Amino acid sequence: MAEQLAERVIGQPESLDAIIPYIQMYQAGLSPEGRPIGVFLLLGPTGTGKTRTVEALAEVLHGNAKNVLRIDCGEYQMEHEVAKLIGAPPGYLGHRETQPLLTQVKLNAVMSEQNNLSIVLFDEIEKAAGSLQRLLLGVLDKASLRLGDNSIVNFERSLIFLTSNLGAREMARELRPEFGLETATVRSIEEGRSGAKRLETVAVAAVKRKFAPEFVNRIDLMLTYQSLDAAALEKILDLQVRVLQEHLDRRLGNRSFRVEVPKRSRQFLLRRGTSVEYGARELKRTLHRFVMQPLAAMVAEGRVAPDSLVRFELNSSSERLDVVPGKRAA
Ligand SMILES: Nc1ncnc2c1ncn2[C@@H]1O[C@H](COP(=O)(O)OP(=O)(O)O)[C@@H](O)[C@H]1O
Ligand SMILES: [Mg+2]
């Protein structure tokens, strides 16, 4: 499991290493009763793999990234929206039309034949109204949630992930030279571990300012994701190019061909697709725009011979990539 996760989430080994034992406890039948399998708060700069970790776990445990009960907390900024998660009591206005989101049925639906644990993600938790925090208290503490219709949802077989960008702005400032904190940046890169520690301090302080102590106390692990260095970003791009190739092979079958993205072109994609502020968040879109879309056009026009090699060369303007269709691949 560790290996499969590390193939998918790059540059965050400490976080993965910390999560895995909770899953093993569950698989060994040794998780404490009356609590979720684990409650994790993932912190750190944007685009560093927090949400990706949860998807990767679903891929590894269930064979599908979609096997996650995901609550986008940005959709629950108002108190009445939070009520929609649990549904209105019978007889109340809206009882019939509101299907609560956090039902046992929905929780069970994200299990799989491979695995009977469910992954629940409260994404960007800081955006939710305060009442969501209160609602979560019981879930985190007793692994149970009472719905509007009085039924109880059991979270004892759930891994609960909360992600938050709290402190992200301060962290970006800490990491970005043009904000006059050049020394801080240089230090956090040079010192590695201690730079990481500083991010953690910023993140945890922001969490404690925002959330009530009883909420914070119920979290098993607070994990601070590190900003990704150049080597990690390069690896993520390699991974995405590989996924793109697999996608072509799967979709085109024997009409497929090989895509080659030389080093200089990769550097271009990294320049365009990554930043201190957004991490690797834009990388996929960049690859899509400069590689996948031109490819799609060529395939649609029948300009790529099956089995050929298609190279993406950096244009002399350094502003885009040129497609160089080649001969048959060796
Ligand atoms: N550590 C990482 N390993 C692999 N891919 C990553 C990593 N960090 C970011 N990405 C890429 O960037 C996208 C956005 O990352 P995400 O995990 O959603 O960021 P956040 O930390 O803000 O939740 C992912 O879908 C993935 O393509
Ligand atoms: Mg996220």
Image (spheres, rainbow, N blue to C red):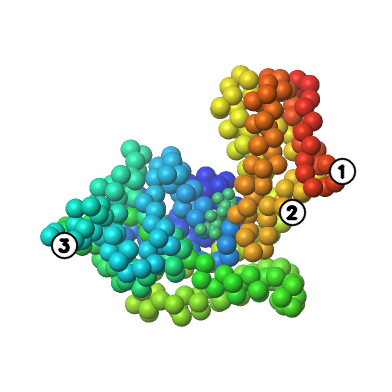
Q: Quadrant of residue 25?
A: bottom left
Of tags 1 and 2, the one toward the viewer is: 1
Query: Eyeballing the image, is 79 above or below 283?
Result: below
Outermost residue, right side:
316
Question: Which quadrant does the C terminus fall into?
Answer: top right
Counting labels gives 3
Q: Which mark is residue 316?
A: 1
Secondary-structure class at tag 3: loop
Marks 2,3: beta carbons within 8 A: no
Query: Label 3, on which residue?
Result: 92
Q: How far is the residue under mark 1 from the one under mark 2? A: 16 Å
The amino acid pointed to by label 1 is Ser
Precedes in sequence: disc 2 or disc 3: 3
User: Horizontal and vertical percent for residue 2?
Assistant: 51, 49
User: Horizontal and vertical percent for residue 314?
Assistant: 81, 42
Precedes in sequence: disc 3 or disc 1: 3
Q: How far is the residue under mark 2 from the one under mark 3? A: 54 Å
The quarter of the picture showing ligand 1: bottom right
Q: Of residues 131 and 260, which is closer to you in this image?
A: 131
Precedes in sequence: disc 1 or disc 2: 2
